[in-house]
Image (cartoon, rainbow, N blue to C red):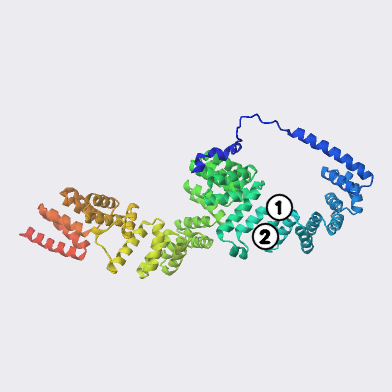
Amino acid sequence: MGLMGDKARLLETDRFVHAPDDGREPELQMDAMEAAEAAEASDAVSECGHRRAAEAGDTAAMSALGAMLLRRGDLDGAEPHLRSAAAAGDRAAANNLGVLLHQRGYADEAGGWWRIAAVAGSAAAAHALGRHYRERGDEPAAEYWLRQSAESGHCLGAYALADLLEHRGDIGAERWFRAAAERGHREAAYRLARLIEDGRDADRKAAYGELTQQAEAEQWYRQAAARGHRRAALQLGALLEDRGDIQEAGRWYLSAAKDGEARAACALGYLLRDAGDEESAAEWWRRAAQDGDGNAANALGALHADRGELQTAERWYRAALDAGDVNGAYNIGLLCAEQGRPGRGEQWYRRAAYAGHREAANALAILLLQRGDASGAEPWFSKAAEAGSVDAAFNLGILFAGRGAERTAHAWYERAAAAGHTEAALQVAIVQLRDGELQDAERNLRCAAGGGSAEAAFRLADLLDRRAAAAGEGVPDSERTADDESTQWYERAARQGHRRAQVRVGMFAAARGDAVEASEWYRAAAEAGSRNGAFNLGLLLAREGSLPEAALWWQRAAEGGHGRAALRLALLAARRGALAEAQTWCARAVEMGPPEVAERAARLRTALQEELSA
């Protein structure tokens, strides 16, 4: 991954961009103190000029001087100048006088001056007046004045109007967020991006395809993030990470994290962990956790748990819980279970389950079921399943199947299968195979096999073979090719350790004359306990002349209930003259069958009895 080779870019932020070295000595720039002194001198000159003009009765100078003093925080000095200018009809002075009075706590008088300025055409005063009315709860008046400000092109007015409209659920909010964002308002750009990404406007969904919608949201996130909006940087990072642009996502997470966004620090930690840098990941998680991010605290807990530092892990899980993340309680429960303390784990599972943690509810139900309390387990399984736990839905299927309530069990299996649960899909498919619903069975078998179920892969291969045979399209084992789909599924199941699949793949190899491969598959199945594998391996060994070893495998198969293996052992014993032993194996073969084997074993046993009695 690019990120793995570029860890320094994520951590050493001062090295993102290097200025080109053209070999020339750079010119010394004015330092901050010099710049401040220059600005102060310029303001002093301007203030003197405005003051002289104001004393001479110049209204514009009074307004400018009052604004200058207001910006400086000299309210007492600014107020008389602003009052004089406002009384003379200067709308900027009226607006600034409203600001001054609002700062002093005289909201009603401030509103009066803002109204005067707004009526005179001041967009800034209309914005201030709109906010004044909104603070008082008069939304119609607030909307009127904010709309006046926004329609006059005032950026803050457009944003405040959009905020009001969104609060009311009015779809017109997007237009005004856009207007403010286009004038550089970073919060407006961020909120516009969220609106677009959420797709809450049905018309917007029709007007923009999903990709275009996402691209437009990204554009506004970028604008806000570039202006220092840390939540926009976080969202942009998440969007890029989902798209696979890990390196750029890391840069934006880093930017937001350095500005104090705990969630970005947490996300950055996950990127670094995935890149193999656990130490740096832990440092960022620690920063985020100390800022109250429960997800980061849980990540730290998991990291220490993996290292075997269980006390430290529990401390961080508790920190996550203190931060309001109920996963902390669930993780402490898991920790207790790993330590062999299910009683203590139960209390943590309960705490998380009562708080709505679905996996904790499922874990609690499993504990109760293991203790024999099926009636206590069922409501927790139900609660977890209704909250969306796929495992809980599957477990409910097992619970009801154990009670003989097959219909209810099947319904829960179907629910879990629809959510992609591998074993549930297999259980549903088994019922559908039994009922002859082959098309639906195939769909669920493919789902389960694709999810890693060896049994599903074997059953799918068998279904495909039976369908081909019914259609007259079946091929002999010796003519199977690697491109044959059923063969691929058999081999997949065999590689996963499925004994019956291993025997089948061994039979395919034997049919095409590859005794070595056949022997390997039969041996793998036999060593895993397959009596058919043991019998077939014995046949191969016997053909190669290794009768003693073949007999060992036949004996293992016969002891597992394989009738043909018992018959083979009876024949071997009879040939070497061990007639009593041969009779014993014949009796076992008659017991185990199948019918044709039992019939042959019975005839051999009769012959042996005649021989022994002769």
Q: Which numbered disc covers residue 232?
A: none
- Residue 338 in the image: state x and y as whole percent: 47, 47
The mark total stands at 2
Residue at the location (83% across, 39% down)?
43
Q: Quadrant of residue 603?
A: bottom left
Identify the mark nearer the N-term, 1 or 2. 2
- Residue 348 in the image: state x and y as whole percent: 54, 51
Q: Residue furthest right?
A: 56
Residue at the location (86% across, 57% down)?
116
Secondary element under disc 1, as helix, strand or loop, is: loop
User: As drawn, is 109 to the left or to the right of 321?
Assistant: right
Type of amino acid under label 2:
Glu
Within-10-Å neighbours for mark 2: few <14, some 14–19, many 20+: many
When the figure is inspected, residue 110 is found, relative to residue 434, above or below; the finding is above
Q: CA distance from mark 1 to mark 2?
A: 14 Å
Q: Quadrant of residue 560?
A: bottom left
Within-10-Å neighbours for mark 1: few <14, some 14–19, many 20+: some
Residue closer to the observer: 480 or 369: 480
User: As drawn, is 92 to the left or to the right of 183?
Assistant: right
Q: Which residue is mark 1?
A: 183
Discs 1, 2 touching: Cβ within 8 Å: no
- Residue 356 in the image: state x and y as whole percent: 57, 57
- Residue 241 in the image: state x and y as whole percent: 54, 49
Residue closer to the observer: 571 or 145: 145
Residue 542 visible in this rendered orientation of the protein: yes
Type of amino acid under label 1:
Arg
Q: Which residue is mark 2?
A: 174
Q: Residue furthest left?
A: 614
Secondary element under disc 2, as helix, strand or loop, is: helix
Q: Specify the quadrant that holds the C terminus.
A: bottom left
- Give the foreground label among 1 and 2: 1
Residue 555 visible in this rendered orientation of the protein: no
